[in-house]
């Protein structure tokens, strides 16, 4: 579902991309085609988890404003 969490000033888009999106590494491949973990014992880090981490960082840096 879509939910508005805040706004980003147009001039901060490049800053958001560089300081938030590129600063948090995206999830790597974690499952094979049989849905078995490639790295057993390591917790799954899904795309939604990455998105929440980027969002949190952007709020901390003041890039996203409520």
Image (spheres, rainbow, N blue to C red):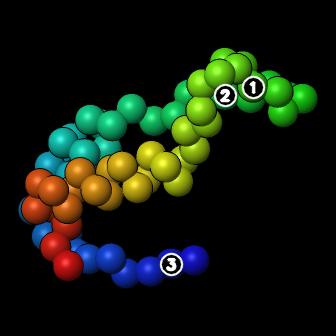
CA distance separating discs 3 and 1:
30 Å
How crowded pointer 1 is (Cα within 10 Å; few <14, some 14-19, many 20+) is rated as some
Q: Which residue is mark 2?
A: 30
Q: Is residue 32 left or right of residue 65?
A: right
Res 29 visible: no
Task: Say which residue appears at 20% left-offset and 61% top-offset.
Answer: 59
Q: Earlier in the sequence, mark 2 or mark 1?
A: 2
CA distance separating discs 2 and 1:
6 Å
Res 30 visible: yes
Q: Is residue 19 left or right of residue 25?
A: left
Answer with the quarter of the image where residue 26 lies.
top left
Q: Which residue is mark 1?
A: 37
In what quadrant of the picture does the C terminus appear?
A: bottom left
Would you say the residues marked 2 and 1 are in contact, meaning their CB atoms lie under 8 Å apart? yes
Q: Which residue is mark 3?
A: 2
Instruction: Name the spot of residue 17 as percent of width and height, x first.
Output: 25, 47
- On residue 8, which mark appears? none
Instruction: Name the spot of residue 64 as percent of width and height, x first.
Output: 20, 66
Q: Is residue 49 left or right of residue 40?
A: left
Q: Is residue 32 left or right of residue 17?
A: right
How crowded pointer 3 is (Cα within 10 Å; few <14, some 14-19, many 20+) is rated as few
């Amino acid at each position: 579902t879509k939910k508005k969490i805040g706004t980003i000033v147009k001039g901060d888009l490049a800053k958001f991309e560089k300081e938030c999106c590129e600063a948090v590494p995206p999830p790597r491949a974690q499952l094979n085609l049989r849905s078995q973990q490639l790295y057993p014992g390591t917790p799954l880090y899904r795309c939604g988890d990455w998105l929440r981490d980027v969002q949190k960082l952007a709020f901390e840096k003041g890039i996203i404003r409520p």
